[in-house]
Image: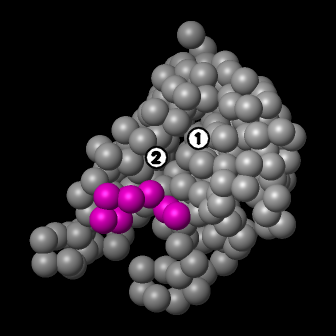
Amino acid sequence: MKVLAIVGSNAVSGSGRPVESGQGAIEKAASSFLETVAREGYEVEPVFLRNLRIEYCDHCEVCDHEERCSHDDDFWPVYQKMKAVSTIVVFTSVTSGMMNPKLSALLLRAGRIARKHADGFRGRLSGSFLEEFSDGGELVQGQLRIWFRMMLMSEPVETRVRVGRGVDGRHSLPGGEQEARRLDAAQELGKKLMWKLAT
């Protein structure tokens, strides 16, 4: 049984400095989640979207006839990974009520192709981790629940962690407290998934 964590994150840190894959705040949370799962003996793999080029679907309808996509980008290998695993958990920041744009583009395309050619991702376990910087986490959570349902996946295990900004646009928590809150939430999500796998 393999767990795939798809991590939508920004190309820069909160301070505006570029960061390497796996080193951003939400990427660290995803890594902590996967460590929790791996300790229980499950195979895990992260996919960091930061350095991948994922274009939006332009509705060319090629995938309506064949299980392929006309875009020449980094989508297809990620889609193949999604088809090959038993569990898919997505990680995203929520800013202005929206998920990470690369994650949105990936799910739009993967969903369209999988529903046409693979009966969605039927029977796979699902989950989501939302890092809320501003209002709108419930909207993104609702979108992801609908996507999982349309893909014929299980009801998701979920975590939302508010690390956000106040109404004045400033961070409402010190950096160390933000990270601790993210990591605690990620480990809790791992425990929720382990419980679901065991039942």
Majority secondary structure of the magenta segment?
loop
Residue at image mark 1 = 89
Place of residue 60 in the rendered image (x, y in percent of width and height, measured from the top left):
72, 55
The residue under the point 37% across, 38% down is 142
The residue under the point 49% across, 23% down is 155
Q: Which amino acid does label 1 sit on?
A: Val
Is 100 magenta? The answer is: yes
Place of residue 124 in the rendered image (x, y in percent of width and height, measured from the top left):
66, 25
Instruction: Using residue 142 as the reference point, say whether residue 54 is left or right of it.
Output: right
Place of residue 29 in the rendered image (x, y in percent of width and height, measured from the top left):
52, 55
Q: Is residue 84 above or below residue 176?
A: above
Q: Which of 48 and 95 is in front in this view?
A: 95
Figure label count: 2
Q: Quadrant of the C terminus?
A: top right
Examine the image and state in which quarter residue 134 appears.
Answer: bottom left
Please report the bounds of the magenta region as a residue range: 94-101
Residue at image mark 2 = 129
Instruction: Using residue 129 as the reference point, say whether residue 107 is left or right of it.
Output: right
The residue under the point 42% across, 86% down is 15
